[in-house]
Image (spheres, grey):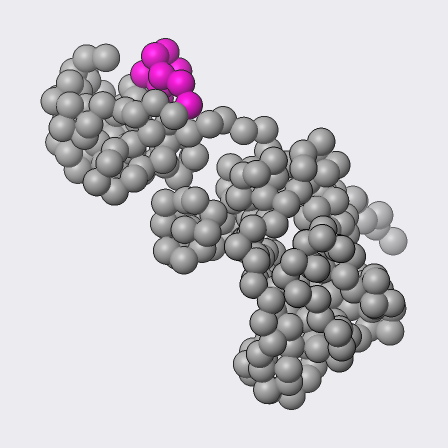
């Protein structure tokens, strides 16, 4: 790795390519990159240019930056893949890929719904709900941060966190089925978001990483809203697709 040549391409992209090549050539997951001062001096660029290159690599999940410590090579993972049109629990999705689903940082609390979520569930503001606040794991790695609000009328005898894990595997779907509540379909809003500090910390990410948010309302066969859910998917672990079929002209 040497001083960069002047080309029409932005310098920070040249730096990003040089660091990527260094990682492929010499480093393995968990290894620490040379310090910013060392890298900048070796490449003959400013610290600000170097940081822009490192930001790209962090956003792609190739490195992880720890404030005051340094930058480290991330473990490469095979994404958990699935058609987003398929209705399955996160546990089922993870298990279908041969990985073991789990739950960590679990909280179950009863609280009133604010106006925005209450309107999505077609109930008055202040209606009581059970909030399932948790991190879903795949083979022990945090991959999804989820918030599910279930109207308390559907779960009159809510489980303790210990019972939720032991009896239902940390799955709200399984808990609802055990209470004779059947989810028939889901309406999902799908959008990219930027991880704030709280969610980034729960998923072990640097803040400002892009995430995929699935904001969903679950309905029964009578079109009654049951659950409002927000699932924030770790960008390094999930790849979704949608099958779109051609509409024949009439």
Magenta region, residue range: 20-29
Residue 4 included in the magenta stretch of the image: no
Which of these two is toward me, 244 or 184?
Answer: 184
- What is the quadrant of residue 170 in the picture? bottom right
Q: Position of residue 13 (x, y in %)?
A: 29, 28
Q: Residue at x 46, y 27 (%)?
A: 75
Q: Does 25 sit left or right of 14 as displayed?
A: right
Q: Position of residue 186 (x, y in %)?
A: 74, 61
Which of these two is toward me, 247 or 167?
Answer: 167
Q: Is residue 114 above or below residue 65?
A: below
Q: Would you say residue 211 is visible in this rendering?
A: yes
Q: Quadrant of the N terminus?
A: top left
Total numbered badges shown on the rendered structure: 0
Q: Position of residue 138 (x, y in %)?
A: 61, 39
Q: Residue at x 76, y 55 (%)?
A: 167
Residue 21 included in the magenta stretch of the image: yes
Q: Residue at x 25, y 42 (%)?
A: 67
Q: Residue at x 56, y 63 (%)?
A: 107
- What is the quadrant of residue 148 in the picture? bottom right
Q: Does 204 sit left or right of 13 as displayed?
A: right
By secondary structure, the bulk of the magenta-drawn segment is best described as helix
Q: Does 234 sit left or right of 31 as displayed?
A: right
Q: Would you say residue 10 is visible in this rendering?
A: no
Q: Is residue 56 above or below residue 173?
A: above
Q: Is residue 84 above or below residue 141?
A: below
Q: Position of residue 134 (x, y in %)?
A: 57, 57
């Amino acid at each position: 790795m040497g001083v960069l040549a002047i080309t029409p391409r932005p310098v920070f992209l040249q730096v990003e390519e040089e660091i990527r090549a260094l990682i492929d050539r010499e480093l393995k997951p968990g290894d620490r990159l040379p310090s910013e001062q060392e890298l900048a001096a070796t490449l003959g660029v400013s610290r600000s240019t170097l940081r822009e290159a490192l930001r790209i690599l962090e956003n792609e999940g190739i490195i992880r930056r720890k404030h005051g410590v340094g930058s480290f090579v991330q473990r490469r993972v095979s994404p958990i893949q699935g058609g987003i049109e398929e209705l399955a629990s996160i546990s089922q999705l993870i298990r279908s890929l041969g990985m073991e689903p789990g739950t960590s940082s679990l909280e179950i609390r009863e609280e009133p719904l604010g106006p925005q979520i209450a309107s999505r569930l077609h109930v008055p503001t202040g209606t009581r709900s059970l909030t399932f606040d948790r991190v879903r794991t795949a083979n022990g790695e945090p991959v999804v941060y989820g918030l599910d609000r279930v109207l308390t009328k559907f779960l009159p005898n809510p489980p303790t966190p210990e019972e939720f894990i032991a009896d239902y595997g940390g799955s709200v779907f399984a808990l609802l089925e055990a209470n004779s509540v059947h989810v028939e379909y889901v309406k999902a809003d799908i959008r990219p978001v930027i991880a704030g500090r709280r969610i980034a910390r729960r998923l072990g990410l640097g803040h400002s990483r892009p995430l995929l948010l699935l904001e969903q309302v679950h309905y029964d066969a009578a079109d009654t809203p049951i659950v409002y859910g927000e699932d924030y998917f770790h960008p390094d672990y999930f790849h979704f697709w949608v099958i779109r079929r051609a509409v024949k002209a009439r």
